[in-house]
Amino acid sequence: MIETEVKIKISDIKETRKKLLSIGCQVDREFYREHNIFYDFADGRLEKSRQALRLRRIERKAFLTFKGQPQKSRSFKVREEYESEVKNYRHIRKILKKLGLRPTFEYRKKRMLLRWGRVKICLDITEVGNYLELEGKRSDIVKLARQLGYSRKDFIKLDYVQMIKEKRQQNQSSSSSKSSSSSSSSSGNSSSSSSENSSSSSSGS
C-alpha cells in the first residue's frame, strides 16, 4: 500500500491534544512506548536505495515493516509500505540475522494515536522534540492541518531516522570539540606549570 504522511513540529503536547479533541478527533490509544530497530545488509543496499526494514516493538507486540523509496512530492512524504505483526520477537531477530541482515540504527519514542475521519494522527515525543504526524489522503491532511492552525509551510517530509541521526552527529561533534578544547587547555596548563617549576629551580640555585 502507499502511505502518505507529514510531520509538524509542536511545542506543547498537552495543548495540541486539547485542540485535537476540541475539533472532534477520537483517541485510539493513549501514550505508549515504542522501540524501533532498522535492519540492512552489510553492503548497506537498503539505505543506498532509500528503502528501509524496521522492526518495531510495542510492549509484547512486534511489527515488521518494509518501506519503499520515497516518491516525488513537494509537501508530503509518500512511499510504499507493508507491515505485518510478528508473534515471536526473538525468533524474527534470529531470522533476520540468518538472512544476513543486521541492526544499523535504533531509537525510542512515546506515541499517542488519534483519528479524524480517515486521517490517522500520531502525537510523538522523541529525542528531537515533539511532533504531530498526520497520515491519510492529501486533501484530508491539509484540511485537518488548517483546522489546527497549520499550513503546507509547516509540513516536514523528513523521517525520524534522518532527524535523529543528524542530531546525534551534531551532539557527537560538539562533544568532540569540547573534549579537544579541554585537552588543549590541560596541555597548556601543564606546560605553564612546568615552565614555572623550571624557573623556580633556576632562581633557587
Image (cartoon, rainbow, N blue to C red):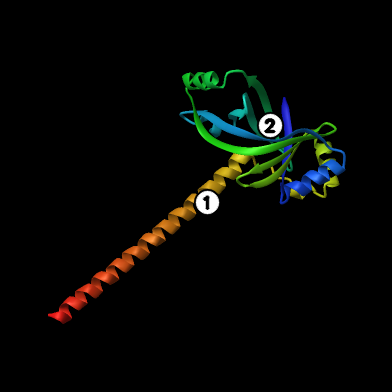
Look at mark 2 in the image and give the residue it sits on: 79
Q: Position of residue 112 (x, y in %)?
A: 72, 37
SS label for mark 1:
helix
Residue 50 showing in the rendered view: no
Q: Is residue 151 above or below residue 202?
A: above
Q: Residue at x 32, y 64 (%)?
A: 187
State how far apart marks 1 and 2 are (Cα): 28 Å
Q: Is residue 182 above or below residue 36?
A: below
* 1 or 2: tag closer to the N-terminus: 2
Q: In the rendered structure, which amino acid carries the disc numbered 2?
A: Arg
Which quarter of the rendered picture does the C terminus lie within?
bottom left
Q: Position of residue 111 (x, y in %)?
A: 69, 37
Q: Is residue 156 left or right of residue 101?
A: right
Residue 84 showing in the rendered view: yes
Task: Count up the numbered dots.
Answer: 2
Which quarter of the rendered picture does the N terminus lie within?
top right
SS label for mark 2:
strand
Q: Residue at x 36, y 60 (%)?
A: 183
Q: Residue furthest left?
A: 205
Look at mark 1 in the image and give the residue it sits on: 170
Q: Position of residue 97 (x, y in %)?
A: 48, 22
